[in-house]
Image (cartoon, rainbow, N blue to C red):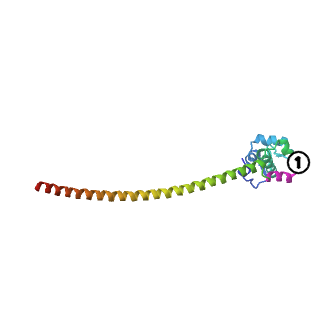
Amino acid sequence: MAKADLPEIPERLSFKIGEVSRLVGVKPHVLRFWESEFGRIRPQKAKNGHRIYSRADVELLRRVRALLHERKYTIAGARALLQEGEAAVDAVLRAMPTETAVALDEVEAAREALVAQLNEARADLVEARRARVAAEDEAAFWRGEARKAEALLTRATSRLGVHLRALKEIVRSG
């Protein structure tokens, strides 16, 4: 779950562990483990022994989660970065990871190649459509010519029949 996928933190002062689990995107046992690894995470305990996290705790836990899950820091690396201060953590979280930048460049190059292929395919499609229209026009022309030739042949055959009958008459009478 990326940072953008996390729910917004409600405007409240305190949160139970189940709520924090949902807001941070990790299971409650992970929150309890992080308490043991990061000294700055110290939720208050209610009279009944339940953990009560402050808004600052939730924000810190989200930062820890981002370092561990998104930036792939080790627990020791995240702990050391948190000890350097908020500015160091902010710089790391704002900076685009190198592998992400490389992946973005690769995706952009692939996108440009696909756009070029798409434009080439569109040009081929336009040319194919023009050729089809031209072929259909030519086929229509030749169908018309074939009809004309058929009509001429029909008339010629008819005239030939008339001439043959006349010739037979002449041969019989003569």
Q: Is residue 87 magenta?
A: yes
Up the image or down, 50 lies above or below 109; here it is above
Which residue type carries mark 1?
Gln
- The segment highlighted magenta reads 81-94
Q: Nearer the viewer, residue 38 or 128?
A: 128
Q: Secondary structure at mark 1?
A: helix
Residue 50 placed where, x, y %?
79, 43
When asked about the image quadrant of residue 33, the answer is top right
The residue wearing badge 1 is 83
Q: Could you classify mark 1 by the number of other residues whose Cα lies within 10 Å: few (under 14), some (14-19), or many (20 or more)? A: some
Q: Nearer the viewer, residue 12 or 143?
A: 143
Q: Is residue 73 magenta?
A: no
When asked about the image quadrant of residue 35, the answer is top right
Residue 120 placed where, x, y %?
59, 55
Up the image or down, 127 lies above or below 80; here it is below
Q: How many marks?
A: 1
Residue 63 placed where, x, y %?
80, 49
Q: In terms of secondary structure, what is the magenta stretch mainly?
A: helix
**One can see residue 6 in this view:** no
Residue in view at x 83 percent, y 53 percent: 91
Residue in view at x 21 percent, y 56 percent: 161
Q: Is residue 126 left or right of residue 54?
A: left
**One can see residue 63 in this view:** yes
